[in-house]
Image: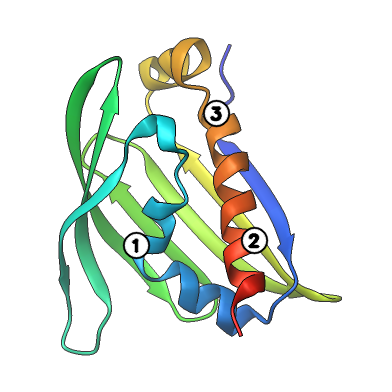
């Protein structure tokens, strides 16, 4: 049986503000998705202050093309971002300081059917580990 919620975390050798700033741009999160998902960032909307309100992610699963619209439901600077996908899952990215940088944690949850399909075909837990490795590399490489 699939777990009720997926949770993953990683240490990044960078201050919280730097990690959060990187993550608040959906292009960075989408860009970290492994190539086999063929994910690209579509249209998006921002407030006059530059905060994302929603954005599209175009991707391919089982040979079919999909577009998911993500709505930014929560945005707490240097703490947490919560994005809700039109396809059901809710993704939470949170950052907090640790002894030598930042701990990035993601939680996501979806319907029971989505969890079963993920466990059989998509392996989202493995994809997020690959994405975290990309985010860690990118953030730590920033000047």
Residue that mark 1 sits on: 26
Return the residue found at the far right. 99
**At 71% across and 55% down in the image, what residue appears?**
10
Could you tell me residue 29's position as x and y percent? 42, 56
Q: Are marks 3 and 1 in contact (CB under 8 Å)?
A: no
Judge left or right: residue 40 versus residue 99: left
Return the residue found at the far bottom. 49
In the rendered image, the vertical position of residue 131 relative to residue 4, given as above or below: below
Check disc 3: other Cα within 10 Å, few if <14, some if 14-19, many if 20+. Answer: few
Mark 3 or 1: in front is 1
Question: CA separation, marks 2 and 3?
Answer: 26 Å
Q: Which badge, 1 or 2, is on the more N-terminal residue?
A: 1
Assign the C terminus to one quadrant of the image: bottom right
Task: Tell me, for residue 4, which label it has, or none.
Answer: 3
Assign the N terminus to one quadrant of the image: top right
In the rendered image, the vertical position of residue 87 relative to residue 45, given as above or below: above
Question: CA separation, marks 3 and 1?
Answer: 25 Å
The picture quadrant where one finds residue 75 is: bottom left
Judge left or right: residue 15 versus residue 84: right
Check disc 1: other Cα within 10 Å, few if <14, some if 14-19, many if 20+. Answer: some
Task: Tell me, for residue 136, which label it has, or none.
Answer: 2
Mark 2 or 3: in front is 2
Could you tell me residue 121's position as x and y percent? 45, 13
Could you tell me residue 135's position as x and y percent? 57, 59
């Amino acid at each position: 049986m699939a777990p009720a919620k997926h949770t993953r975390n990683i240490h990044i050798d960078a201050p919280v503000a730097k990690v959060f700033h990187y993550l608040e741009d959906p292009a960075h999160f989408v860009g970290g998705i492994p190539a086999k998902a063929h994910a690209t960032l579509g249209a998006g909307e921002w407030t006059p202050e530059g905060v994302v309100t929603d954005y599209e992610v175009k991707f391919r699963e089982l040979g079919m093309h999909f577009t998911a619209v993500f709505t930014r439901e929560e945005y707490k600077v240097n703490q947490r971002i919560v994005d809700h996908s039109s396809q059901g899952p809710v993704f939470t990215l949170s950052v907090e300081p640790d002894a030598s940088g930042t701990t990035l944690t993601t939680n996501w949850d979806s319907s029971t059917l989505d969890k079963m399909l993920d466990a059989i075909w998509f392996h989202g837990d493995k994809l997020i580990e690959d994405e975290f490795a990309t985010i860690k590399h990118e953030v730590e490489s920033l000047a």
